Amino acid sequence: MTFAATILTLYPEMFPGPLGASLAGKALERGEWSCATVNPRDFASDKHRTVDDTPAGGGAGMVLKADIMGAAVDHAIATQPSAPILAMTPRGKPITQARIREISHGPGVTLICGRFEGFDERLFEARPQIEQVSLADIVLSGGEVAALTILDACIRLLPGVMGAPDSGVEESFENGLLEYPQYTRPQTWEGRTIPEVLRSGDHAKIAAWRKAMSEDHTRLRRPDLWERHEGVRDQSASGARRKNKDTDQ
């Protein structure tokens, strides 16, 4: 099954962009995913193909019109009715690796790229199936770069794209933690040596070291992730205790 990506953008020439190279590009050539763009200007009725207007209430910048964007979204829905629809906006919920994995297991995705001051809020009120997502607490010139990033994250998880089936299993965020440190030859570089445990051949010790490093790095670098991880772990342990207690009765 081909993973079908549809991008609503005022700059269709930006796609597939970097996704036409490397592993994603080879997968595109093999037909493992497809890339189609929809330009909202095609749904404007005036001679200038206007897609934006000044903010109601005044203020700087321009706002993408709800009627034009709504028509473009409806076209995308008709083309891919079962695909999730994500709007790129800094006001959105930060997207997670778990959500990326869910999307990659589906038929495809429709991505709406914002521009200017963003979208008329009535678009989301009228089309509640649209998920508002962001990459991080940053503001970009437009949603195209964010859309490319999300697409890259999805495509690399498609079967056969990365090669080895387990290539993405132990990466950062897959288990709620940051990935452990990686090393390769030469064994010694500028006086720094690969940790002895990784040269021991003892797979159990290596696994334990990697788990400890993953936890340490997450706790120090991303306390927000660590707090969430600990909460999930405590909840799982509490559930297990309740289950055992119920069994003993």
Image: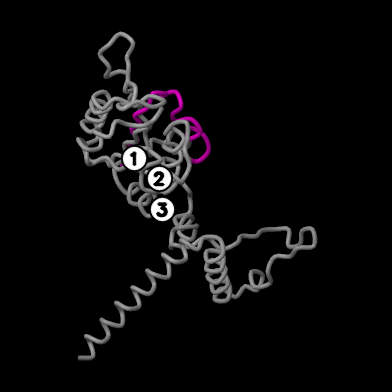
Q: Nearer the viewer, mark 3 or mark 2?
A: 3
Q: Position of residue 156 (x, y in %)?
A: 45, 46
Q: Secondary structure at mark 1?
A: strand
Residue 154, label in figure: 2
Q: Is residue 17 magenta?
A: yes
Residue at 33% across, 37% down:
87
Q: Nearer the viewer, mark 2 or mark 1?
A: 2
69 and 243: which is toward the camera = 69
Residue 3, label in figure: 1
98 and 34: which is toward the camera = 98
Q: Which residues are magenta?
A: 1-23
109 and 45: which is toward the camera = 45
Q: CA distance from mark 3 to mark 2?
A: 9 Å
In the picture, measured across the screen, residue 188 lies left or right of residue 67, that is right
Height in image: 78 above or below 248? above
Q: Position of residue 54 (x, y in %)?
A: 34, 22
Height in image: 245 above or below 38? below
Q: Nearer the viewer, mark 1 or mark 3?
A: 3
At label 2, the amino acid type is: Cys
Residue at 53% across, 66% down:
219
Residue at 25% across, 81% down:
243
At label 1, the amino acid type is: Phe
Q: Earlier in the sequence, mark 3 or mark 2?
A: 3
Tag 2 and tag 1, C-beta contact below 8 Å = yes
Residue that label 3 marks: 97
Residue found at the far top of this picture? 47
Q: CA distance from mark 2 to mark 1?
A: 9 Å
- Looking at the picture, the colour scheme in use is one colour
